[in-house]
Image (cartoon, grey):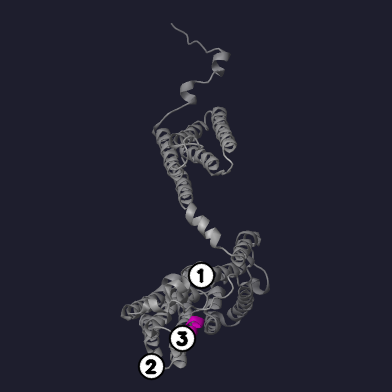
Amino acid sequence: MHLPIAPSPAAARLPSHRSMLPLDLEDLTGLGLALALGLLIGIQRGWALRDGAPGSRFAGVRTFGLLGLAGGIAGALHGNAEGLATVLLAASAALVVIGYWRATQRSSSISGTSAMVGLLTMACGFLAGGGNYAMASAASGVMVLVLAMRNQLHGWVRAIDEAEMQAIARFALIALVVLPLLPDTRFGPYLAWHPRQLWLVVVLVCGFSFAGYIAARKLGASRGLLATAAAGSVVSSTAVTASMAEKLRDEAGDPRVVNAAIALASAVMFARVMVLTGALAGYVLPLMALWAVPGLLVSLGGAGWLVHRSRHAGGIQDNAVALRNPFALGPALLLMLLVMVLTAAARWVQERWGDAGLATVLALSGMMDVDSAIITMGNLPPGSLAPATGALVLMPPVLLNTAIKAGTAIGIAGWRKGWPGAAVLLASLGASLATLPLLL
């Protein structure tokens, strides 16, 4: 009879290499992805520095591939051999730092891009080796894209003037600093005010304004009225329509293209309303799109038809819509105050007269400002309005605004000059009204 022999205490303390470093298909996949991502990044760096003198490059394709693989091995080992993984990462990072130091000694121009990319390549490899394939691939792809856009990014920086730089800094302050710090709770009468959502109004309005300014500045007068009209309509399609009608009246450019700009401004208005609704009152968007999308498509089709008919679209490039300040904080704050008043009033009306009174208040406020009605709806508690009711509440102010713009075009420019643009607006209004039975 053979008795089992118990292992000695010292032998029991010794780790089994087979259990400490298991290897399976998932590990091999992670290592392969880490190496592939490193090679991808290395190809971009090699191409970007292809004209450099021999020996001047910090690292080449093979080095970046090996950095990615080193990170992948560390990621695979981290769960079972954390000390070994840490040593491997620290040694690889030290080599990157030493290589960067040596490169700065040989050249008077200092650039930390390649060294930083080397460290990030190891990080992406670590993620891949640890099984975070999607994050590793996404981070590597974004890094390669940013590296490949070097000339474009430098060109954009050179083109920014002082006012635009200040606008970027202020927008970053209100969107990235103030917004996350605001409490995510309700306060005020009827608990109607939500600080973070209210400040989101300011962020969205300033963002729309700044995006329109940049688009108009980038594409503006050199591309004609269409680009500037579309950009200006991000802020106010009514103002753009009035400006275009004045150009028609003064015969400043091809009337077909100017009328196309009026139609395009209306299309942008439909798109802006849907984007704002999706961001703040998403439950209304599916039904709202039933009537907004037909109006958008008809407006776009009319604009395209008018542009197609024009033979001199390139001859009016000097006429541009006047652009407002790239960072208009004042109007955004006024809109936020209006939304606060309307939200409190809407909660009071709902308490006294129910959903019918609430829908009436929102519809009437939308006649004055469509955006304020949308934002007020987004600040209401969930379930305050049915989606169909919300879509019907927003429909009249948007379509009334379209009819007013058609009348503005004819009233300022005259029937003979303004009827093509007005006809497109009225056709888009009719297309939206045709979907009313679906909502009812």
The secondary element bearing badge 2 is classed as helix
| Residue 67: percent from left, percent from top | 49, 35
> Callout 1: 10 Å neighbours few (<14), some, many (20+)?
some
| Residue 323: percent from left, percent from top | 54, 76
CA separation in Å, label 3 and label 1: 20 Å
> Callout 3: 10 Å neighbours few (<14), some, many (20+)?
some
* Front disc: 3 or 2: 3
The residue to which callout 3 is attached is 247
Q: If the image is split into quadrants, where does the C terminus sit?
A: bottom left
For the residues labelled 3 and 2, say whether their Cβ atoms are less than 8 Å apart.
Answer: no
Q: Is residue 404 visible?
A: no
Relative depth, front residue between 271 and 291: 271
The residue to which callout 2 is attached is 416
CA separation in Å, label 3 and label 2: 14 Å
Between discs 1 and 2, the one toward the N terminus: 1
Q: Which residues are magenta?
A: 238-245
Relative depth, front residue between 198 and 217: 217
Q: Specify the amino acid type for callout 1.
A: Arg
Q: Residue 217: give its label.
A: 1
Q: Specify the amino acid type for callout 3.
A: Lys
* Front disc: 1 or 2: 1
| Residue 140: percent from left, percent from top | 46, 45
